[in-house]
Image: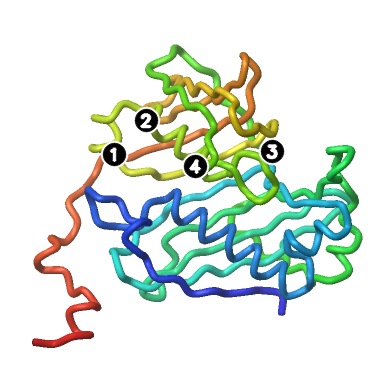
Amino acid sequence: MPKYTKNYTVVLDDMDMQQYRLRPISAISYIQDTFARYSATRKMAAFDLQTKGQYWVISELNMHIIDTLPFWAEEIKVELWFSEISKLKIYADFRLYYNNKVFAQGDSLWLIMDINTRRVARADEMAAKFAVCKDLALSAHSKILLPDTVGEISNFSHNINISDIDFNNHTNNKSYLHIAAMALPEDFRKTHLLKTIQVRFNKETFLGDSLICRVYKTGQENLFLHRIDKDGVPVCDVITSWKNIEPYTTIVDYDLKVKSEYPL
């Protein structure tokens, strides 16, 4: 079973309230859930690692949105596989499907950490339990390089609260992405759609920590660096690129599945 698939339905909490379509941040949550489910099939889920004094962390993620995002109540399929497992690094590539078409794809870098030392543990057991599929969703597994910046445009502050904490008792990955999104000016978010996102997680943060995200322009139009700091130290870097919103099919004309579930 070199590739693993899981189907999901776009629920209310996962959609963009302006376009009524799946939010990219929610798509990333589905990817992480699929990773967890696949790991569980080989007894390598988070709760399995805890018994060995270890835990999962995601170190980097790249996602390219290449087609229209699915509408509310529609079904999507996440396909995920391990494309490379080295002594320490585990790469999981993924594709997301809607109406049998790929609408997003990318890769993610995962590490197994030792609970006591907070150091990276060897991935030997992972390599022994999973087959590697050499199919790359993107052109290569490349280290995320931060672009040069030409000035700050906005910022957003956030204190980590209990809703931000995951089962490892540190800040959930999704919370960093929410902070990065909120740091963009609201008028920009309302008029643009995400094309690509690259995330580099640098350090763990915890309940009560105060974070600030500063958004910087780069030399390329609609390409931004979101740097999230704690006490002046970068804990997460997010690079996003955007395009102008184009009109989708109107909601009135949309052939919504729920209309046929309960015909008049």
Q: CA distance from mark 2 to mark 1?
A: 9 Å
Q: CA distance from mark 2 to mark 3?
A: 22 Å
Identity, as a three-letter code, of the amino acid under mark 4: Ile
Residue 143 got which mark? 3
Q: The residue tagged with tag 3: helix, strand or loop?
A: loop
- Crowd rating for badge 4 (residues with CA inside 10 Å; few <14, some 14–19, many 20+): many
Image-based side of 118 in relation to 13, left or right: right
The first of marks 4 and 2 along the sequence is: 4
Residue 222 got which mark? 2
Q: Which residue is mark 4?
A: 197
Which callout, 4 or 2, points to the residue nearer the camera? Answer: 4
At x 50% / y 17%, what residue is drawn?
149
| Figure disc tally | 4
Identity, as a three-letter code, of the amino acid under mark 2: Asn
Contact (CB < 8 A) between labels 2 and 1?
A: yes
The first of marks 1 and 3 along the sequence is: 3
Contact (CB < 8 A) between labels 3 and 4?
A: no
